[in-house]
Amino acid sequence: MTKRVAKTLTAKVLRKQYLYNKLVTDKRRAIFQARRQRALEVSNMVEGGWSQFHIEATKWRKLPKKFSAWDIANDDGWTVAHEAAMSWVLPDDFPFWGLADNHGVIVGHVAARQGTLPFDFNQWAIANEAGWSIAHEAAKYGNLPMDFELWDLADNRGRAVAHSAARSGHLPPDFNQWALADYAGWTVAHEAALHGNLPDYFNQWALADVYEETVADVLAHYNLKGEDKAMIVVSQSAKLLVHLNAEQMYALIEAAGRVCYQSPMSTNPDAQEKFIRGLIGRGHHSVLEHGVLGFKFVTDRGVMAELTRHRLASFSVESTRYCRYEDPDSFKVICPFELASPEYNSWLDAMNNSKKAYDAFLKAGVPPQIARSVLPQCFATTIYMTANVREWRHVFALRTSSAAHPQMRELMGLALAQARDRYPVLFDDL
C-alpha cells in the first residue's frame, strides 16, 4: 500500500468519525432541547409553575452534565438554580449567583443560608436590588469563612455585613470594627447591643448615631438588668432529639422494607444504603413511617400555629394559660425578619408596651389565661414535635419551599440540616 493510499484511507476514517461525532452531538442537543421544551410545558401544567427540572434539581445527577436552563422559574420566580442551591454545592464557575426570584431572593442567598457555597467562594458582593449581598445572608446564618474581611460591604441603606453578623451573634471573637455605621449612624456596636451580642471586652460605649443615641443608651433602654429589664429578644432554634442512631434507624427501616419482598437483610452498609435509597426512589415511603424523629423548637406563636397544622405529628406546646411571664427572663420575643432601625426600635417599643400591659393584668389579679390576650404574635414558645420519617420529609419539602413564611423556612432549614447530618440516607435528597 502506497503512502498516498494510506493517507486517503486515514482521511476517510477521520471524516466518518467526525460525521459520527457530529451526529451524536446533534442528537444530544435535540434531546436536550426537547427535554427543556417538555419542562416548560410541564411548568404550565403543574400548579405554581414548577417544572420537571425543579424536581430533578434536588437530585443533581439527573440534570444533564452541561445543563444551562438554570433560569426556568415557577410562578414566584423561584428558578431551577434556586432549587439546586437548597441542597447541592453548585460549581465554582456557576454564572447565575445573582439570579433573583420575585421576592428579591437571589441564588447566592439560598446557598449562603443553606451553607452550600463552594469552599473557595469569593463573589460575596453579588446582591439583590436592595443591595443585600450574599455576604449579608451568610453572616446572618453564621456561614462566613474564618478569614472573611469584607465587613464594611453595605446594602442600599448603608447596613454593613457586620451589622448582619452582630444581629445574629456571629461576629468573630476578635472583631474590632465597631464604628461601622449605616446612613443613620447606627453602628455595629448599636446592633450588637440591641441583640445582647456585645463581647465582654467591649468598651466603646460613647459611639452615637445621628440621633445622639449611644451604645450605652441602647443597652440601658432595651437590655436593662434586674427589675427594670422588660424582656429578651431571642432567635429561633431547632434541636434534634435523637431516638435512634443512624445505624439503628437504617436497620429498622430496612427490616420493614425486606418484609415486603421477603428478601434477606444486607450484609454491609453500602447494600443497606442502596436498598433504602431504592425504596425512597420508587416512592415506597410507607416503610419510612417506622422511623421516628423528634425536635425541640423555639419559635413564635405565628409559626407555631402553622406548624401544628401537620396532623400526623404529635405536639407538646408551652401553655400560656398556665405559665406566667412576669419575670423579665421569661418574657421572650422573636424579631420578625428584615426589620432595621428605626422600624426595629418601633417594634421593640410595642413589645415593651405589651409586657407592661401583661404585668399590669397579673398585678390586678387577672389570671394568666386571660392576661395572655395582650401577648404579641411574636411571643416565643417552646414546642416538642415528634413525627415519623415520612411525615418529616413532607414537612421539610413543604416548609422550606419559597412559598413558605420566611421564619418557617429558617426554622425548618435548621431542622433539616440536623436531620441530613444525622441520617443522610433518609434526607439528603431533599
Image (cartoon, helix red, strand yellow):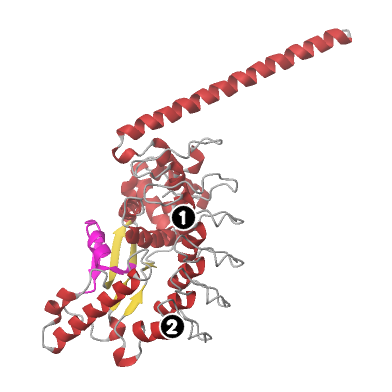
Q: Amino acid at mark 2?
A: Thr
In this view of the protein, which residue sits in the foreground, 429 or 73?
A: 73
Residue 232 on image: x %, y %: 33, 79
Does the stretch in magenta take in 297? yes
**Residue 292 makes an appearance in the image:** no
Label 2 secondary element: loop
Residue 109, numbered label = 1
Residue 78 on image: x %, y %: 39, 45
Q: Amino acid at mark 1?
A: His
First in sequence: mark 1 or mark 2? 1
Residue beneath the point at 24% across and 59% down = 306
Of badges 1 and 2, nearer the viewer stands 2
In this view of the protein, which residue sits in the foreground, 28 or 270?
A: 28
Residue identified by numbered label 2: 214
Q: Is residue 282 above or below residue 289?
A: above
Does the stretch in magenta take in 59? no
Q: Is residue 149 above or below residue 271?
A: below
**Residue 393 makes an appearance in the image:** yes
- Check disc 1: other Cα within 10 Å, few if <14, some if 14-19, many if 20+: many
Give the magenta range.
Answer: 296-319
